[in-house]
Image: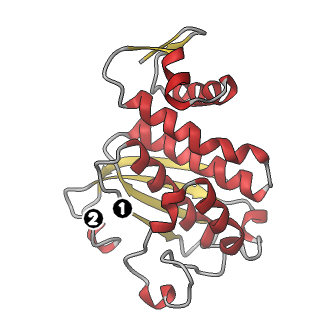
Amino acid sequence: MRITDIKYLKFNNASKLSKFFDPETTLCRFTIHFNKEHMEIENAFQNIFPELKQIFPNFADHECCHDLDLKSNSAYNIVEYGNYMDIPHLLEHLTIDILSTIYPDRRFSGSTCQYEEAQNKFDIFINVKNAQVSLFAFHLAWSTISSIICKQALTRLFQKVVQIASFIINYKGNNIHRNEIVEQFNCSSPVIEQALLLLEEFSLISEYTEEQVVI
């Protein structure tokens, strides 16, 4: 998958995408291209969704608020398209799930649209106020789904990474001692290191050392 464009602005026709969007809603729009092999994965929804429920327990509570005719054919509350739409659609929902973990007091909605002229090109819209946090969440969501597709054991670490990220992003202060993170989450240094690397990559922390994290 390639992210070919990111826009962070208000879309005048946003309400046509979701009943939870309005002209005053600030949206982050990710334009993505999928590789041919991802477009040809069979039973993508059935293979990916159960794994996501295990890694992110709240994922089972997600619900699509449109396409009700399609939802009636699925055993889940998330629409199952049964084709190449399933992966970008699950990517939208997982990004929202990660954002909801980081900001539990906010409500997030999204919409996935396919380009008519290119079946492997999609726009994913999400209402989010922080562009850097949304990019972090989107990147982590895709890393999780890619790991499931490739059957990588690393997938199990992602929920802890999201929890650590939420703790740091919402921390009241400019510096955190790393031992505080260890005590808070009772996790190993490699997991903390992975979370800090991602947070630094997306400029959500300034720097970190073996002893402290600078926000």
Q: Along the line of sight, which residue is nearer the eye, 79 or 179?
A: 179
Q: Mark 1 = which residue?
A: 109
Q: Residues within 10 Å of mark 2 (few under 14, many from 20)?
A: many
Query: Is 46 on the left-hand or right-hand side of 121?
Result: right
Q: Look at 31% across and 44% down and name the residue there.
A: 129
- Relative to 83, residue 2 above or below: above
The quadrant in which residue 190 appears is top right
Type of the residue with mark 2: Phe
Q: Is residue 128 above or below residue 130?
A: below
In the picture, measured across the screen, residue 37 lies left or right of residue 25, that is right
For the point 50% across and 38% down, the residue is: 163
Residue 5, image x, y percentages: 51, 48
Crowding at mark 1 (Cα within 10 Å: few <14, some 14-19, many 20+): some
**Residue indicated by mark 2:** 21
Residue 198, above or below 35: above
Numbered mark located on residue 214 in the image = none
Q: CA distance from mark 2 to mark 1?
A: 8 Å
Q: Is residue 118 in view from this perspective?
A: no
* Looking at the image, residue 116 lies above or below residue 180: below
Q: Position of residue 21 (x, y in %)?
A: 27, 64
Give amino acid for label 1. Ser
Q: Where is residue 102 drawn, in percent x and y? A: 41, 42
